[in-house]
Image (cartoon, rainbow, N blue to C red):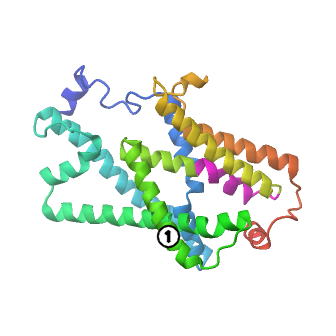
Amino acid sequence: MIASLAGSDEFSGFFDPLADGVALTTLGFFLVFGVGVLGQPHMLHKFYMMRDPRQLRWIPLILAGSQAVCLLIWVGLGVAVPALVAQGRMTPLVSADTAAPRFLLEFGSPALSGLVVTAVVAAIMSTADSFLNIGSAALVRDVPRLLGWPVSDKLAHARWATLVVALAAAGLALAYDDLVALLGTFAFGTLGAALAPVLAVGLNWKRVTATAASAAMGTGLVVSLSLELVRRLSPSGTLAEMGLASGALPAAVALLASLSVVMVVSWLTGTEDGEDIAPDVLAIMES
């Protein structure tokens, strides 16, 4: 079956790792997911819960093992579902997002389907509640402190902020009208562009100042959102109208722009002694 798929004209690109994409887009995804992971708040905040930093030595083993299993699942589904459709054993999908549930319902046992659905819902809840907590905390604590408008009853306001963040996220998801994976990639890339350069460079270079960090975060956020909007409104669905290569990924461009800003502004405004760094942050840098 696999040999016949590979040899037919209809499935000539079936085993092409880039499929219909271009190398620049692939490199952009590698940059976003390889470097942008350093700026994901729903993962980073969990490190503050660790009692002993020596526990970090187990992360490569745990992360590699869990990711290998996850990739096997999605690669397996990506190969099995098109093969089943080509054989006529499964009707064509209306949306690619239905590949996993359709496969489980039609070919998986009830026990396996229940286990997978439970695991997926648990993973969604874990990430969602992290973002809701982080978002509400930023609205109730960080933004008011920045503007000089401290909030008195933070708990009550945080509850309302959580509802606002949830409704805003739901509205964005419905309006985005694309594959769930692409929506997740857009969110992942925006967070990575705004935070990864600041954290990766800022915690390793004493010259980075608050001005440089703020400028880099603002640059990453604005450039990522702007380029994504331009890409979606563009007739070609690319950034070619802005003079960029057609395969350029908005999040990757924003990440590079944010990295450039934090480096340049830090070089122009910072000092090597780190005298303006908060003591708790300086302790992390020196540990």
In the displayed structure, does residue 233 sit left or right of residue 125? right
Q: Can residue 194 be found in the magenta stretch?
A: yes
Residue 91 placement: quadrant: top left
In the displayed structure, does residue 76 sit left or right of residue 33? left
* Position of residue 259 measured from the top left corner of the image (x, y, whole percent): 69, 45
Q: Can residue 267 be found in the magenta stretch?
A: no
* Position of residue 38 measured from the top left corner of the image (x, y, whole percent): 59, 55
Judged by its main secondary structure, the magenta piece is: helix
Q: Nearer the viewer, residue 2 or 267?
A: 267
Q: Is residue 265 above or below residue 242?
A: below
At 58% across and 50% down in the image, what residue appears?
192
Identity of the amino acid at label 1? Answer: Trp
The N terminus - image quarter: top left
Residue that sits furthest to the left in the current view: 89
The C terminus - image quarter: bottom right
Any part of residue 249 in sight: no
* Position of residue 27 measured from the top left corner of the image (x, y, whole percent): 53, 36
In the displayed structure, does residue 180 sit left or right of residue 222? left
Query: Which residues lie in the magenta part?
Result: 192-206
At 19% across and 36% down in the image, what residue appears?
83
At 18% across and 53% down in the image, what residue appears?
104
Which residue carries the number 1 mark?
Answer: 160
Q: Nearer the viewer, residue 7 or 244?
A: 244
Q: Is residue 146 above or below residue 237?
A: below
